[in-house]
Amino acid sequence: MSKILVTKPFQAPYEEVSAEIQRAWDAQWLTNNGPLLNEFEEKLNGFLGTSDCSIVSNGTIAIQVAIKAFNLSGEIITTPFSYVATTSSIVWEGCTPVFVDIDPFTFNIDVDKIEAAITEKTSAILATHVFGVPCNVDAIAKLADQYKLKVIYDAAHCFGTEINGKSVMSFGHLSTLSLHATKLMHCVEGGAIFVNDHSPKVDSLSGKVSPLRYRIDRLRNFGHYGPEIFDGVGINAKNSEIHAAIGIVNLRYAQEIIADRARQHDVYNSILLGSGLKFPHIEDNVQWNKSYYPVVFQSEQEALHVYNGLGNENIIARRYFYPALNTLSYIEEQGDTPVASEISKSILCLPLYFGLENEIITQISHRVVELCDEFRS
Ligand SMILES: *Cc1c(COP(=O)(O)O)cnc(C)c1O
């Protein structure tokens, strides 16, 4: 079999991409919060049904700017089961990550264990909706209210996921999205911060915005408020018109991409469900975007047997997420997270990307079952 990668970036017809880029070219406006970027923000809000998003240069800086927007300090409660950017952003911003174990069914932070981790130094909860499956947002909101904590969701995987028909981006004070090429929706490199601030609006350069949005827009653009006024310390977290052009085109295919993920899940499920493997639990009120196909094996040894067996046939699965983030070399307090430790060792994400054929998914699935049988006998 020719090589099957774990993921491939979605690529729209090139003519469509070049036609959008042509607009930026003709306008001779290539970056700095231009018309295409604003259009991309509007269309992203339009698709998701959200009211306020600020596009930035990637999903990692989105987390960092979110932390900065609240001037967080001290301890941030977080999950050990996510991509490294969740933890590294906390550390980069001079805060201390405090790791709480995950729920064995959703693989998200275990809300029943958060309270015990709160101290007088805790300033926020930064949780990941892992693989696009939402955290228990109601329980987290309640705790945050009670202890006056900020809630930031790393929603990098969540484009298109909904809770009761509402985008998962509308929960928490801020949610961050990644628009990286490997994500379900992308603009090559990019990210977005979704703002849920309902306090009275303030004047900004482009009309009235919420105070939090105001702050984020200063942070992402060097602090600029006009050419000569700098309102606070900022960074360059802007994105370009070229990225926005590609994002605008890709958004036209969003519905199709999500539907295609569902098709692929159905094929995998038809063979793999009931073969002694574990999959994320999805609540009834959740419309999952099915952005990944994670499988938890019965042990690390079994997962590695399958990983290597597939690899020998040019099928590339990924140990996603491994290692658990509380084991990173720069982490001082690992906490006690046996569930995350076990799941990160025994999980694989199987190939999933737009256009991956049913036939190939069927072959991969049968091979997974055979390799498990082989390992278990
Ligand atoms: C991809 C990802 C990020 C980082 O996004 P980039 O756009 O690559 O910087 C952060 N968190 C999670 C969970 C991710 O999967």
Image: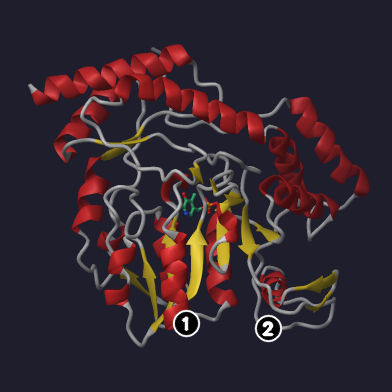
Q: Nearer the viewer, residue 139 or 134?
A: 139
Type of amino acid under label 2: Gly
Q: Secondary structure at mark 2?
A: loop
- Mark closest to the chain's N terminus, 2 or 1: 1
Residue 143 picture location, percent across and down: 41, 74
Q: Position of residue 361 (x, y in %)?
A: 41, 19
User: How far apart, in angstroms, are the residues tagged by discs 2 and 1?
Assistant: 24 Å
Query: Which residue corresponds to the image point at 49% horizontal and 16% vertical from the top-left?
Result: 357
For residue 120, above or below residue 65: below
Residue identified by numbered label 1: 148
Q: Is mark 2 within 8 Å of ligand 1?
A: no
Residue at 47%, 32% in the rendered image: 7
Q: Please tell me how crowded label 2 is: few (under 14), some (14-19), or many (20+) other residues with Cα within 10 Å.
A: few
Above or below 139: residue 227: below
Residue at x 25%, y 60% (from the top left corner): 327
Q: Is residue 85 left or right of residue 176?
A: left
The quadrant in which the N terminus is found is: top left
Here the colouring is secondary structure
Residue at 27%, 22% in the rendered image: 368
Q: Nearer the viewer, residue 141 or 80?
A: 141
Check disc 2 and report the residue beneath it: 232
The reply, left or right, for residue 57 in relation to residue 146 is right
Residue 253 quadrant: top right
Q: Nearer the viewer, residue 140 or 186?
A: 140
- Disc 1 crowd, CA 10 A, few/some/many (<14, 14-19, 20+): few
Q: Which residue type does callout 1 highlight?
A: Lys
